[in-house]
Amino acid sequence: MKSYAAVDLGASSGRVMVGRVGPDSLELTEAHRFPNRPVRVPEGLRWDILSLYGGVLDGLKAAGQVDSVGIDSWAVDYGLLDADGALLGNPVHYRDARTEGVAEKVWATVPAEQLYAATGLQYAPFNTLYQLVAARGTAQLGHAERLLLIPDLMSYWLTGEQGTELTNASTTQLIDPRTRGWSHEVASRLGVDLGLFAPLRQPGDPAGVLRPEVLEETGLRGPVPVTAVGSHDTASAVAAVPADGERFAYICTGTWSLAGLELDAPVLTEESRAANFTNELGLDGSVRYLRNIMGLWLLQECVRAWGEPELGSLLLEAANAPALRSVVDAGDAAFLAPGRMPERIAEACRASGQPVPASPAEITRCILDSLALAHRRAIEDAQRLAGHPVDVVHVVGGGTRNALLCQLTADACGLPVVAGPTEAAALGNVLVQARAHGLVGDLASGRHLLTRTQPLTRYEPRGDTARWREAQARLTGR
């Protein structure tokens, strides 16, 4: 067996996991977990990137000797380096307000339909492209010689080598999903200097070896290679979907829900753009055709506002609350910013003429019903727009621990839901490393290994979907 360290950085916490892989075995253990708390400073919301890097070093020390290291994280955000390779300030958080109104400025130069036809990326106010346009004219960007996306920045600090991993680069809205290279026309028209980016890397490519100083701090014996993985955590999570064949949908659940299909080619139609689907790049030439949904962020913010009540009891009470009494649009940008989430959900219900949930259990049920309904809409729309029918929905990520959400998703979709694995991003990270070192074959082989070695739970749909259709019509008018 060989051991691989998977550095998996999420929007609210980071972790270093150790995957031990053999010919017919895959074991995953947690070496170290640490918080990821953004900091609001006078100039806006920033990531505490040095604290994150410190957590990575502590995690590698706790992991013990490994055969390789891979890094994945959330998408779109980046650090800027000066000519000496030093970081120019803490990276801006994607929830920062600096991109408000920027999309309209971009569309005045490159209309939204042209931008989608060129890049295939759904509209999200925090896409890297909008962040770079918002930063235009700032002293920080003016002094930058290099831009590294978050996992590439961590890799650079570990190895001293710079690169831009493709699956994460595809979230910048500067990649052409047909050629899987930079969209020079979009960048040129919007004044984005693609020379800021390091050369593109593919998942599985070597990304350097740990620097002597890192070896000394972590106690590891060199050389320890760093391997490029699907460095967008969703790319790694989709690689760990334990699917058999092609007729499946997936939902990567956590702070966000990413619901969609794995395709061979992008869908770049105007209808797809209007439905706000994105075409991000995955492993082995695949396309992650999906819609971003606000996800368990809604519940996380409510739980924080309520003083961190015991989640199991809250979900049990929510299961007994009236079903589909009130629902909200879980993809509404009105829920993007932190703060006052219970009040904002109540206000949305009041504004739409629905009963206003009052207790934590009622608000939690509203959130979970709304998420299941958003999952239903996304999977129905994806099948229609891509002409790609499915027979099963795979739910991976942190939301697999929420049995109520998994069951409601099966009910809403009218399809069986297979939940697991929970640590999908870390497992996908490990599989790419193991494949790069010859222990695992193709993507299908890795998925079969997951099916044999990871606990999975199946949820069958209950009843018909008439009530869900009615709730969807109430919310969307169709």
Image (cartoon, grey):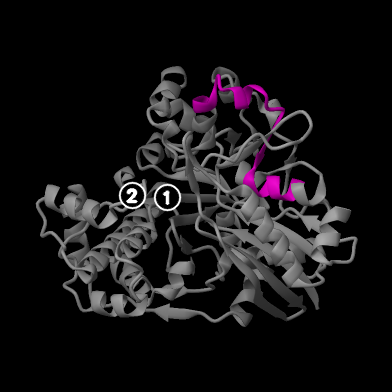
- Work out how far the residue at label 1 is from the one at label 2, CA to CA, in angstroms: 7 Å
Tell me if label 1 and label 2 are in contact, CB under 8 Å. yes
Residue at 69 percent across and 46 percent down: it is 152
Judged from the image, the secondary structure of the residue bearing numbered disc 1 is strand
Query: 327 left or right of 295?
Result: left
Displayed quadrant of residue 171: top right
Q: Which mark is residue 103?
A: none
Give amino acid for label 2: Gly
The residue where tag 1 is placed is 292
Look at the image and say whether residue 143 sits in the magenta stretch: yes
Observer-nearest residue: 29 or 306? 306
Query: 5 left or right of 160?
Result: left
Up/down of 45 relative to 419, above or below: above
Judged from the image, the secondary structure of the residue bearing numbered disc 2 is loop
The answer to whether residue 76 shows anywhere in this view is: yes
**Magenta region, residue range:** 133-156
The residue where tag 2 is placed is 331
Residue at 63 percent across and 39 percent down: it is 79
The answer to whether residue 210 shows anywhere in this view is: no
Up/down of 196 relative to 353, above or below: above
Q: Position of residue 110 (x, y in %)?
A: 47, 21
Give amino acid for label 1: Asn
Q: Position of residue 119 (x, y in %)?
A: 53, 34
Q: Residues within 10 Å of mark 1 (few under 14, many from 20)?
A: many
Of pointers 1 and 2, the one earlier in the residue sequence? 1
Look at the image and say whether residue 314 sits in the magenta stretch: no
Observer-nearest residue: 345 or 408? 345
Q: Residues within 10 Å of mark 2 (few under 14, many from 20)?
A: some
Residue at 66 percent across and 76 percent down: it is 28
